[in-house]
């Protein structure tokens, strides 16, 4: 009995020591420190366009046709979550790392990963949405089917494109002069967007086959580019991806 009690006592003391050690090595101000470190990164790389308050009103914004993101709204175009949901941290890091082609958002591939994480944390602090919501409806890992890029898939995708996409994106022969003035937070602004012109061979989200599929599946939040997740079957979305890839003059590689 005494042995059992002694063992219990030793276990209890060991637990207390572990807790005490954690308290010693824990920095109660670490969250605050990360906030200020993220703010430093933001000031260095982001504030010129996105503004001191993160409202998209930096000194360079007035010269840009497509305005910088207003982080205070918590609405992001390029993400892997369902329409209406906030993005994941990885979604934000991807935009920082890859930039947005055909826009003024450069890539920061050379930024250390820990700085990306800090600035993502700071960006999230600029909107109340992250205090109330969690990312929802994230797409599972995307695996490109073997049929993508084949002649049969491209043909099926062309039929879908003609029916679903041509009215905004135009054809290989001609691009329609379509422009949209966007509304953020129910207020019309001067943010103008045009449907992607696939003849340029790039889309803002990125250069990969998966990026095309993701734009079709998740849509582009806050723009007329809607999500086709519930409008087309998964195979049809991949066939459409095949045709857009062909339109861009690329193969599945």
Image (cartoon, grey):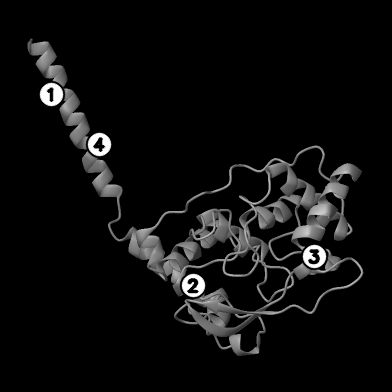
Q: CA distance from mark 2 to mark 1?
A: 53 Å
- Judging by the rendered image, the residue that carries numbered circle 2 is 71
The quadrant of the image that shows the N terminus is top left
**Residue 41 left/right relative to 225:** left
Quarter of the rendering containing residue 3: top left
Relative to 14, is 156 above or below?
Answer: below
Q: CA distance from mark 4 to mark 2?
A: 41 Å
Q: Element under label 1? A: helix
Residue 180 appears anywhere in the view: yes
- Judging by the rendered image, the residue that carries numbered circle 4 is 18
Q: Are marks 2 and 1 in contact (CB under 8 Å)?
A: no
**Residue 177 left/right relative to 193:** right
Q: Are marks 3 and 1 in contact (CB under 8 Å)?
A: no
- Judging by the rendered image, the residue that carries numbered circle 3 is 166
Residue at x 41% of width, y 69% of height: 127
- Judging by the rendered image, the residue that carries numbered circle 1 is 9
Earlier in the chain: of badge 4 and badge 2, it is: 4
Residue at x 65% of width, y 65% of height: 225
């Amino acid at each position: 009995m005494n042995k059992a009690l002694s063992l219990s006592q030793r276990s209890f003391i060991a637990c207390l020591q572990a807790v005490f050690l954690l308290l010693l090595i824990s920095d109660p101000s670490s969250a605050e420190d990360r906030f200020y470190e993220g703010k430093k990164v933001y000031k260095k790389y982001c504030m010129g366009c996105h503004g001191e308050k993160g409202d998209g009103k930096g000194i360079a914004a007035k010269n840009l046709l497509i305005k910088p993101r207003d982080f205070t709204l918590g609405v992001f175009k390029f993400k892997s979550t369902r329409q209406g949901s906030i993005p994941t941290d990885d979604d934000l890091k991807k935009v920082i790392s890859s930039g947005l082609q055909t826009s003024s958002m450069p890539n920061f591939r050379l930024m250390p990963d820990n700085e990306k994480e800090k600035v993502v944390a700071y960006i999230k602090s600029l909107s109340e949405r992250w205090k109330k919501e969690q990312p929802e409806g994230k797409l599972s890992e995307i695996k490109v089917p073997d049929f993508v890029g084949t002649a049969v898939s491209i043909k099926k995708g062309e039929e879908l494109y003609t029916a679903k996409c041509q009215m905004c994106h135009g054809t290989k022969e001609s691009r329609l002069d379509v422009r949209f003035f966007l509304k953020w937070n129910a207020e019309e602004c001067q943010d103008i967007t045009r449907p992607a012109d696939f003849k340029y061979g790039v889309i803002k989200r990125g250069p990969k086959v998966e990026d095309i599929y993701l734009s079709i599946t998740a849509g582009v939040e806050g723009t007329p580019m809607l999500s086709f997740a519930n409008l087309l079957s998964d195979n049809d979305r991949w066939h459409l991806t095949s045709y857009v890839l062909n339109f861009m003059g690329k193969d599945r590689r």
